[in-house]
Amino acid sequence: MDRRTVIAVILCLLFLVFYQPLLRMAGFGKYLEPSRRPTPAAVDTTHADSLARVQSAAESARAAGGPAAHAPAVFAPLPIAAAAGALEKTSSIETPLYRATFTNRGARLLSVELKRYVSAHGVSSAGGKPRRVKPGHAVPPGDRVVLAGGPLFGVDLGSSAGLRPLDGLVYAVAESADATGQDAALTFTARDSSGLAVRQTWRVRPGTYALDLDVQVDGVPAAWRLNDYSLTVRSWPPFTETDRRTDERQVRATTLVGTNLHRDQAAGLLKGPRAYDGNAMWAAVQSRYFIGAVAVDQAVGRGAVSHGEQRPLAEDMVRALGPNEKPVTNVAVSSLVVGLPGAEHPVQRFLLYFGPSDFPRLSSLGHELGRSVDLGWNWIRPISELLLRLLVWVHMVVRNYGLAILVLATLVRVLLYPLNAASLRSMRAMQKLQPEIERVRAKYKNDSQAMNAALMALYKEHKVNPAGGCLPVLLQMPILMGLYQVLLNAIELRQAPFALWIDDLSAPDTLFHVSGFPIHLMPVLMAGSGFLQQKLTPMNPQQAPTQYMMNAFMLVLFYNLPSGLVMYWTVMNLLSAWQQWRVLRQDEPAVVVVPDEGGSKKRKR
């Protein structure tokens, strides 16, 4: 296999890895969504005036002479009466890791404040740079990441088009603490004149971001014709990260139904909901580094429904927008649908998690929640998980994730050294044999069978494997793709500084702006390292333009990617160039300089 074929194979593999992110960045994400039969949209469960707002939008469109806005299927609310004179009040559960705030109206979870994670747009941020806090230390209020999705979580009767919100039901609240005085549980209880009784009990899991939720539903009138209910999680505005636009593109609803993992981008869900029937394990909403999820513990999951919403931003968020940005945000909504409990087992149990998309934390909770962290295709995930653990272990030694990336890149290059050396020697042998190959092709240009036979005989005579330069490259591609996923999505790199101007390995390394265009130095250094590697790679001079084009393609592709990922690729290029220099230097025959009769010197090999 010649050098041109190797380049073509590498470009194809890069295309397979990057084509979905590139399409989404270009605004063509809708073409990635599989065609499904549309499911009638559900009512917004967060506002009791949903029907009025939908009807008002339709009437406004008709009055303007345009086509009527598409109104989702809306059902009349259940005959649930709020307690007379009941006032809305908030309650909270607070632990060393987070503070969760609830409202008694609808027993909704309003927000979760993460005490150990710094928001990029906190009150102490300056010049787009967040406040620096040592890992594991509490962040001052005002600078913390706050997940608030208006609300984040709620329980409602019914599902999908038949959803019946319980946001008008006012619950009685009872709080309890453990022996040390720490919050331990929060119980919401409501009873309606129709006979409906609902109880939700939230319990703390010490040392984690997880909460246990017990749900008891009794006395649902047969006339309502309901046999299931929904537990709904909602995403939050993407204003926690320095690289806000990348974070916004990754807002999605994720569900695990049976063994099938479904990821639906919020922008795609605006075009229509997605429904998945089957044994639902959990439903979640995610940004790049944080997740809100509800998982079945003791219940019968019947399916999951995801849809999208668009909501206006708060005034403080609007001030952080750049030019030409709309003051709205896409919201992903994901509902776990479970069957109503029977009389013999009225209590059903669930696990709630609102916190970092930390693979070890999520995996330790069970329910296959670790699969929510995007570490690549299923066949790459084992490699990605191993590399992530190795990265964390190296960081424990060097105490800097930038240095950990350098060490990891070196370890990977050492591991792949035999494969790369074999590939280089094979390419070098093919390069030396190229004149003979061209001679055979010219001699048998009108007889392909004779040409192939002569070429195979030539390869056998010189003990050259034509595929020797390609196979080692293909064998190491899973490792490189796994590392790409780890360095792109690992929360360990979030706001992690390295040195000099690189103060966040999870974001592009912006030096300054020129007319609003960001200038990133690391991608330029990466392109330079790629050029150096190409200069040391054995190749036919006719193939040089193709190599330069590939290097330019990589520069464009990596320009807006996180600096940690670009730095890794740069180091790999430099190590590859060094290895190629060593291998080719060892491969060259010795040069002996001897004087001739006239006193001048000649070089002999």
Image: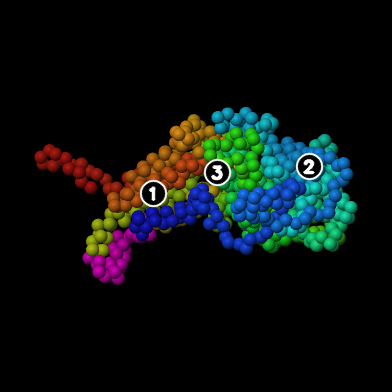
Mark 1: secondary structure: helix
Mark 3: secondary structure: helix
- In the image, the segment drawn in magenta is 443-469
Quadrant containing the N terminus in the rendered view: bottom left
The answer to whether one can see residue 365 in this image is no
Between disc 1 and disc 3, the foreground one is: 3
Q: Are marks 1 and 3 in contact (CB under 8 Å)?
A: no
Which badge, 2 or 3, is on the more N-terminal residue? 2
Residue, x 22% and y 43% (percent of image)? 592
Specify the amino acid type for callout 1: Met
Q: Is residue 445 magenta?
A: yes
Give how far across and how far down residue 186 sits, in percent.
Answer: 81, 43
Q: Are marks 2 and 3 in contact (CB under 8 Å)?
A: no
Q: Are marks 2 and 1 in contact (CB under 8 Å)?
A: no
Which badge, 2 or 1, is on the more N-terminal residue? 2
Between disc 2 and disc 1, the foreground one is: 2
Residues 237 and 194: in front is: 194
How many numbered circles does the render carry? 3
Q: Residues within 10 Å of mark 2 (few under 14, many from 20)?
A: many
Q: Which mark is residue 550?
A: 1
Which badge, 1 or 3, is on the more N-terminal residue? 3
Q: Which mark is residue 103?
A: 2
136 shown above or below 333? above
Mark 2: secondary structure: strand
Give how far across and how far down residue 22 sits, in percent.
Answer: 49, 50
Residues 266 and 571: in front is: 266
